[in-house]
Amino acid sequence: MLGHLGLNVTDLAAAKAYYDVLMPLVGFEPFLSDVDQFAYRPAGGKPGTYLFFYPEVGPGAAYSRHSTGLQHLAFMVRTRDAVHEALEAMTALGSPVVHPPRVFPEYPQPYYAAFWLDPQGFLLEAVCHR
């Protein structure tokens, strides 16, 4: 099982404000918050992967999901309504929609999902396998 993922972001405070809204909607709770990092863990003591955020150390190349590195993050949710709820909350914060909620027949079924971009440009997904 994957223990945790770490993501570097250009603006730690802005990322925290954004993910503080998203993470409870996709089954995570705060794990730690400090001046140089913050993290979430699966809520309710469930096993799963923790997600850590760190400030970028120095100026680097602009993020692109099409380059080597992170392609996207998918969060499994229990219902199709939860897919809509996550997308609506994030678009209310200004996130652009990449793919609105729908069945994706090209993926192993059942696969109902929505995709959007966070302020960093990371492609995020809420997916329900029911």
Image: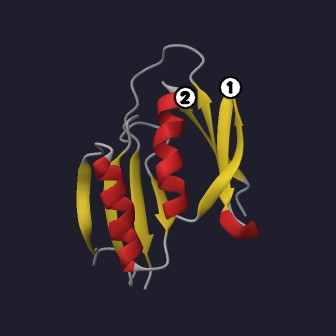
> Which of the marked residues, 1 or 2, is nearer the chain's N terminus?
2
Distance of mark 1 from mark 2, alpha carbons? 8 Å
Q: Could you tell me which quadrant the C terminus lies in?
A: bottom left
Question: Which residue, given by chain and number where applicable, does mark 1 sit on?
Answer: 36
Q: Is residue 91 above or below residue 126?
A: above
At horizontal 32% and vertical 64% (from top left) the residue drawn is 114
Horizontal side of 87 relative to 27 (left or right) equals left
Identified by mark 2, the residue type is: Leu
Residue extending furthest toward the top: 58
Residue 21 place in picture, x, y as percent = 48, 50
Horizontal side of 100 relative to 119 (left or right) equals left
Q: Could you tell me which quadrant the N terminus lies in?
A: bottom right
Identified by mark 1, the residue type is: Asp
For numbered disc 1, what is the local secondary structure? loop
Q: Residues within 10 Å of mark 2 (few under 14, many from 20)?
A: some
Q: Is residue 18 visible?
A: yes
Residue 97 place in picture, x, y as percent = 25, 52
At horizontal 36% and vertical 76% (from top left) the residue drawn is 81
At horizontal 36% and vertical 37% (from top left) the residue drawn is 121
Question: Which residue, given by chain and number where applicable, does mark 2 sit on?
Answer: 12
Residue 65 place in picture, x, y as percent = 38, 41
